[in-house]
Image (cartoon, coloured by chain):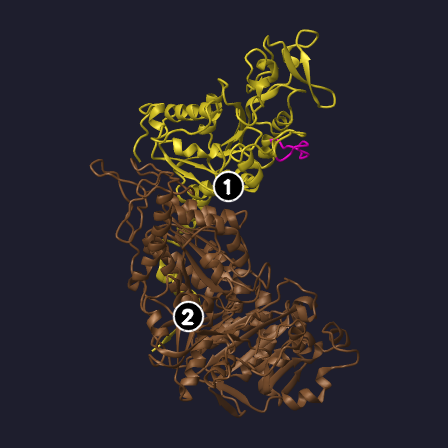
Amino acid sequence: MPEKELNVLKPKDFASDQDVRWCPGCGDYAILNQVRRICAKIGQTRENSVFISGIGCSSRFPYYMETYGMHSIHGRAPAFASGVKLANPGLDVWQVTGDGDGLSIGGNHLLHVLRRNFNIKIMLFNNRIYGLTKGQYSPTSEEGKKTKSSPMGAIDMPLSPLSVALAAEASFVARAVDVDKDLGEVLERAAKHEGSAFVEIYQDCNVFNHHAFKYATDKDSKEDHILRLEHGKPMIFGKDRDKGIWLDGNRKPRVVELGKGIQADDLLFHDEHDESLSFLLSRMTYPEFPEPMGVFYQIEDECYENLLQKQVDDAIEAKGKPDLQALFNSGDIFEVK
Amino acid sequence: MAASTNTEVPQSNKPTEELASAVIRFAGDSGDGMQLAGTQFTDTSAIFGNDVATLPDFPAEIRAPAGTVAGVSGFQINFAASDIHTPGDEVNALIAMNPAAFKAHIDDVQQGGIIVVNEDEFTKINLRKAGYPEGYNPLDDEKYDNKYRITKVPITRLNEETLADTGMSAKDIGRCKNMFALGLIYWLYQRPIDTTVSYLEDYFGKKKKLPAVAEANVKTLKAGYFFGETTEMFPVRFHVARAPVAPGKYRKIGGNEATAMGLATAAQLASKTLVYCSYPITPASDVLHSLAAMRNFGVKTFQAEDEIAAMCAAIGVSFAGQLGVTGTSGPGLALKSEALNLALMMELPVVIINVQRGGPSTGLPTKTEQSDLLQALYGRNGDSPAVVIAAQSPGDCFNTAIEASRLAIKYMTPVIMLTDGYIGNGAEPWRIPNVEDLEPIEISHPVFDEKVEWHPYQRDENLSRPWAIPGTKGLQHRIGGLEKAHITGNVSYDFENHQFMTDLRRMKVEKVADSIPDLEVHGEASGDLLLVGWGGTYGSILTATDRAQAAGKKVSCIHLRHLNPMPKNLKSILGNFKQILVPELNTGQLRMILRGKFLVDARGLNKIAGKPFLVEEIEDAIKIVLNGELGDREYLTPRLHKVDINDQDIDLAKFGINAVRL
């Protein structure tokens, strides 16, 4: 195995020769830049990296990375990525998906890739709209959303991608905003996680759903609307860091102001290894709550591709090296002379 | 792996009738262990040296209500002193474990045939469950007595008495009665019992750690055998001598098992890891089961969350440089078609096994059919040429799986391999190949050379693109389902490029014909009638052709393994015969292709009854065609085991449909 060439590659070395064709001002550009930066920073190599996507605006991503890549079919990227890992567990596999690709047509595959814990980094670009097909509502569009396919307002109940990921036994669950400073750190932690890492990225579709996340990006007010999670720290937020999350007697989270009889130590503390807490966080939505950002949940667990490889190794250890002739000769044989 | 001895049974005083072949069928409730009795009889006969062919027939429901006709499970074995290719038309001996089994199978037994019934089960309740009228018992009906040689044996009671002192529960004792019946039939056909004895000892005694159960089964097996010897119930015993076959080592092999072994072998010949990605579906699941047990051959199996994921994962495997294979049956192939098209567009090697079953929709999951040919050839969006090949017998699944893998890799293309429920679940003796005789599968993955310009969609002399795999420095590239620019593989919406690439994909698959052998005509190279078959109907068509030739008729047959592309000499063969008949277990899918592709007046023999052809049905069709009775009608359909030109279908005629069948 050749040694990883640490810090030799620059972010631009991860840029392919293809022109990036997202709409000017699309949130995808910021994410692309962060991913290239993180790949270089953590010493990932171009030849060992594989980016796999489905269909949708976000799924054009692999074309812009100077790595191996597959722009597959709608919703199925987790299954292709799983296959790549089955064949070669040593590759660094990233999956790029969106709210339609990952949660609508591909919802089933997302559940299974997460529960199996393949070592795959999954970035779900959530813009709460169908962009490539020019503006229909998606599984994360808010109730009542008026679009071309819902002129009287969407009557579908939206789902929370992170609640789904947690229920599907994901071993790493996080959220970030496309233009936020913390996106890079979240992606870096995801990249270093051994197992399936699910990262929801709030991404602005400035053509069909502009400002869907204005509350989380507006310079003046965003700190009042998001909660930056830090493991082992009390949940404090606000521009002046004067608000916090407190659990009431019915184990319901409440937004409280610090100072008036409530100290930081009384607040809820973040614990990345606490399943129930992470689920509770995944249910907190704007405007009732600040929306949590950062790593919700992270545990160590065996990866599917390694467990499978171990079964193969164990079987060879127990039964001996592959011998086709012995396989042919198994069962009752009889000789005709 | 014990090499069993061909111990002859002890000599008996009973007279022996020598038979050239015999067809027997075990039938009982689906919980009665008929499949086990049948497979044991098959193993024993194969080891004895007969040629064998089998037809298991079980209900779609795992446990249909006990005692009903819907819950009847059957297993038919044809064993012979000569080379045979089918499980046989008429049943010579039926073993019916209950009234429902009797009712479901009695019409298939030849006149004068032997019927052994478990008379204990012909109770009022069971007769009612079988749907017989109140107060009626077929065993008391003279019409059956006159037509068949019925022997009533109290199998339930004799089995109970045999095992009375074992201390086993009544239920467990009842489960052993299939072995009593098997023992009796072994005696009747002079088969050695030692293969089954060692099976029972290995399976129940060693594997399941139930030595008491093994002992009980052996005891009742022997009791059944000795019952035949000591009672006067059967005036004569039968004997079927060994078949003269080519020297070598043989074993019995089932079709799905052969497919699994072929795939594992192909991977080793290619120095690749086989990753078999599949979602359970009848009748293909046994391929998954067989491969899941082959971890020590480096085989990885992946039970995906659905058919689509299985196909996609197999493609991911191939993209990453190993041998990706998926297996399914008809409805599963429909689900895989979008992803299959992606593999075709990305030009990656992948093998898709389709063990066909009765359709459309859920159809007849446990019954056989050949009605996915057009789906395999054309069931995708766009102009989508895939390589399609079909296995013709259980043992042939081994070779076909290797060839499918070889073509997929050589031409960087998806290859669909068609088998069917009949050959997948059927079994035959298989001459064990020598590993050294198998030709390696050559692969060369490109490596980076800065002096050489390299592109992912450049092509070699086979029009095949390079298989550059992740992990290879300097060859990073992106592929996907959008149209590719020639050579560079970049996304291209250029209309001339699309025309060019569409032609190129077609030409590449047509070029596969360079790698497939010419068809061989069975019989004279020209004549009055050519039968054209494909897939699992091989045995019936071959046997019917042999019989027609023996009767002096100018009839020959060909059998297509390669459905796309077809062998280069097919056209000239078709031109050498006055008439062409295409027997298929569908409504005429190959016939349509032959007519469209070669402008020949091919006629059909089409059966869609969930069962393989009887040889007799093809013989009847040959007669009708040669006698000029077909007129301008395009096809014949057998009904009730007969192809009858005058038999009008009244029900259909009521709807104004009267040209459909003859």
Q: Specify start and end residues of the magenta stretch as a single range.
A: A149-160
**Residue B236 locus on image (x, y percent):** 56, 90
Marks 2 and 1: CB-CB under 8 Å? no
Specify the chain shown as brown: B
Above-or-below relation of B595 to A2:
below
Side of B662 relative to A188 (left or right): right
Name the kind of residue labelled 1 in the image.
His
Residue B489 seen by the camera: yes
Real-space CA distance between mark 2 and mark 1, rounded to the nearest whole angstrom: 46 Å
Eye-nearest disc, 2 or 1: 1
> What residue is shown with label 2?
B251
In front: B625, or A114?
B625
Q: Indicate yes or no whether the magenta region holds residue A159.
A: yes
Q: Secondary structure at mark 1?
A: loop
Q: In the rendered view, would you say B267 is above or below B636?
A: above
Q: Residue at x 49, y 86 (%)?
A: B239
The quarter holding residue B108 reads bottom right
B61 relative to A110, above or below? below
- Residue A287 lies in magenta, yes or no? no
Residue linked to disc 1: A74
The tag on residue A50 is none
Query: Which chain is mark 1 on?
Result: A
| Quarter that holds the C terminus of chain B | bottom right
Quadrant where the N terminus of chain B is found in the figure: bottom left
> Where does the image place residue B362, in percent across and percent down from the top left?
60, 59
The residue most toward the right is B134
Which sits in the foreground, A68 or A254?
A68
Q: Is residue A196 above or below residue B44?
A: above
Which chain is in yellow here? A
Towards the viewer: B535 or B375: B375
Q: Is residue A144 left or right of residue B594?
A: right
Query: Whole-percent x and y of residue B425?
Result: 51, 66
